[in-house]
Image: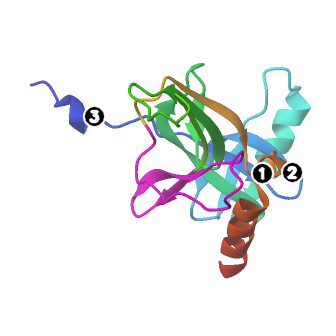
Amino acid sequence: MTLNPLLRMRPLEFRVWHKPTQRMYPVHSICFEDETITHQLDGDASIEQWDDVYESPFKFHECELLQFTGVLDCEGNKIFEGDILYYSCILDDPDEDEDPLYEHHAVIQFMHGAFGELQFYPLEPIQTLAAMQSVISEGYDYRRIIGNVFENFNLLPDYVKEKFLSEAVAV
């Protein structure tokens, strides 16, 4: 019996933003009983560094756990929650006064049971956020990760930063 391709699970993968070290790490394991996260090191890590990781896993309250969306950007990079994406496409039938190149940026978030994007337009003088879409935009000629909200907060316009800061305070 063959499984319906629409019902196949996407890879379940996480990365973690560790607040005390201000670094992003791939997740090795999550222990819900101890509320800890064991992270992975890069391939050049020494045995002593690996021992340190397993002896002192991160506590949940020290971290932001970010899930892989199951979607790749145009360069084959995995898109995670918190990533900032740049989108562009050439419009098939633009209006006379419309630029045929359509561009926007988005921050990936998990909400209402699905991954979605908070779209924003950094080059436009109007400081408005597009409605949150409950899917990651498809149909664009170009979709590339340009950073994430932890390491590249400076890429966000002030009105988007304010939204993230107000949500952090509310939690």
Q: Residue furthest bottom?
A: 170
- Picture coordinates of residue 127, whole percent (x, y): 68, 61
Characterize the local packing of mark 3: few (<14), some (14-19) or many (20 or more) Cα atoms within 10 angstroms. few
Q: Is residue 44 above or below residue 56?
A: above
Q: Main secondary structure of the magenta part?
A: loop
Q: Residue at x 90, y 33 (%)?
A: 48
Quadrant in which the C terminus is drawn? bottom right
Q: Could you give the CA–CA distance between mark 3 and mark 1, rounded to whole angstroms?
A: 31 Å
Label 3 sits on residue: 8
Dot 3 or dot 2: first in sequence order is 3
Q: Name the amino acid type tagged 2.
A: Gln
Q: Residue at x 50, y 56 (%)?
A: 110
Q: What is the magenta range? A: 108-137
- Picture coordinates of residue 58, whole percent (x, y): 76, 55
State the residue in front, 83 or 8: 83
Dot 3 or dot 1: first in sequence order is 3
Q: Residue furthest left?
A: 1
- Picture coordinates of residue 112, whole percent (x, y): 40, 64
Dot 2 or dot 1: first in sequence order is 2
Label 2 near label 3: C-beta < 8 Å?
A: no
- Picture coordinates of residue 164, whole percent (x, y): 69, 65
Q: Is residue 165 left or right of residue 82?
A: right
Secondary structure under badge 1? loop
Characterize the local packing of mark 1: few (<14), some (14-19) or many (20 or more) Cα atoms within 10 angstroms. some
Q: Name the amino acid type tagged 1.
A: Phe
Q: Residue at x 56, y 32 (%)?
A: 99
Q: How is the image coloured?
A: rainbow
Label 1 near label 2: C-beta < 8 Å?
A: yes
Label 2 sits on residue: 22
